[in-house]
Structure formats: structure tokens, C-alpha cells
Image (cartoon, helix red, strand yellow):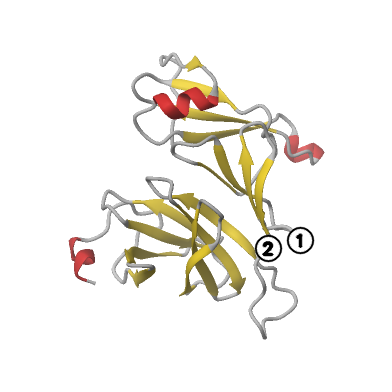
Amino acid sequence: MLLLKDTIAFGREEPANLLHRTRCRPMVLEKASEGWALTGTEAVRISLCGLTPRPSLAPLSAVSTISSSHHAHPSMPLLAKIEHRWQKPDEGKLLLLRFDGSIAFEIPTPQRRKGSPARETPGYTDCRFDDDGRYLWCAARISADEIEVQRRETDGWSVVSRTLVEDPLGEGSATFFPTPEPGTFSLWFAEGGGGSCVYWAARDGVDTRFALEPSLCDPTPPCSPPAAASSW
């Protein structure tokens, strides 16, 4: 969580300029409009935030709807956004948006696994660009106990690899988190009752290997894999 203290002066600039100037990946900040939970409206204020070489905020005024996941490309004016998938069967799709709000590409809701009950609603749950922006990682719920992790190339958005990951919690949320190790990230599952678990993930050629962490009891998202991860 990022706490923006009042003592920090944030300069405003154009989002595209911020992408080319910042020394680290910009963060996406959301602020819901007052009263949206009561009125049912989904308007939000979305901004890119860069911390180096100086703190800056760049409003994305054309992108203003609530999403379960936003992630900015590290060098192109592009935002990956997952629509809400609650209550409507056609939601949960993944959109690639330009900073002016126009759709660059649309990835439809994934198919429900054959044999799954009709009450189960498939949909993308999280997405994240890798550090150099060549690939987009996507987590797709396809059944109550499985997540399909897709790696998509960012030229035509085709799937390079697919890996099925078991959800031990059953219909828990699945979220990507970066780690300090190059080519390694974590996939964190959490459910409303407080249960959680984590997989360490590493690229292996075109494939991705996932290893369930058996000793982690802290329900907060982890950010650093064990040293033994390199010997999977």
C-alpha cells in the first residue's frame, strides 16, 4: 500500500511524458468518487504515479471506471484493465486501453472448464506486464478450483503459454505480485474468510513453473521467494 503524505509535493504532467521520464515502473492509483457505493455509479479518478527522479502524478482523465485490476505498460501509453465480472456473465474480459480511453485490443471472457456447474462465472482476475513489457501475464478463473495463467506477447496479444494452477481455497481471488528475483513472481490466493496461500512462479523457456509454498502462514502477499526457488 502506498501512503501519499501531505508533505510530498507531487507535480502533474502528461501520462506519456511520465512513462518516458520515470526510472521505475509507474503505479496506477484509483480513487472512487464520493458516494459511488451508495449511488451505484462506478466513476473513479485514475492516475499514474511516478516516484523517481521526482514524485509526479499524471491523471488519466479518459479512463474513469472501476476495475478489479489496472496495470500500466512500462514504456508504452497502454493500460491493461479487467472489467468487473460480478453479476453479469459477459464481464471479466480484459481490455487494453490507450491513455485517451480508446480500446487497443479486447480479450473476451475465458471459457468455463467443461463439466463445471453453470453457476460458476469465468473471468480474468488479474493481469501484469513483465518488466520489459514484452509479455502480459493474465490469471483467468475457469472453474471453482483452477486458475489458468496465460503469458501473452504484446505485439498481437496471442497466448505464448498456458498453465493450469490449482486453487486450494476454492474460488479465492488470484493476484500477481512481483519479487526481487528476475523472472520470478508470486501468485497469491486469498478468500473472504481469511485463508490464503501462495505459489512461486518462474519462467522456464516458453513455459512457467509453479511451486506451492508449504510453510507460509502469513496471509499478507509475499514479495520475496526462498533462496531454494532457483533449484526448482
Q: How many labels were placed on the picture? A: 2
| Residue found at the very far right of the displayed protein | 39
Side of 30 where 212 appears, left or right? left
| Mark 1 neighbour density, 10 Å: few (under 14) some (14–19) many (20 or more) | some
Side of 207 where 103 appears, left or right? right
Q: From what the image shows, is residue 203 above or below residue 4?
A: below
Say which amino acid is labelled 2. Answer: Thr
Residue found at x 26% / y 53% = 181
Q: From what the image shows, is residue 23 above or below residue 97?
A: above
Depth order, front residue of 96/112: 96
Depth order, front residue of 80/219: 80
Q: Which quadrant is the C terminus positioned in?
A: bottom left
Q: In which quarter of the image is residue 37?
A: top right
Q: Which quadrant is the N terminus positioned in?
A: top left
Q: Where is residue 209 in the image (x, y as percent from the top left)?
A: 35, 70
Q: In which quarter of the image is residue 214?
A: bottom left
| Residue found at the very far bottom of the displayed protein | 115
Task: Measure the alpha-carbon separation of dots 1 and 2.
Answer: 7 Å
Q: Give the residue pinned by disc 1.
A: 90
Q: Give the residue pinned by disc 2.
A: 109
Side of 60 where 175 appears, left or right? left
Q: From what the image shows, is residue 217 above or below residue 43?
A: below
Q: Where is residue 52 in the image (x, y as percent from the top left)?
A: 35, 24
Q: From what the image shows, is residue 221 above or below residue 7?
A: below
Say which amino acid is labelled 1. Answer: Asp
| Residue found at the very far front of the displayed protein | 155
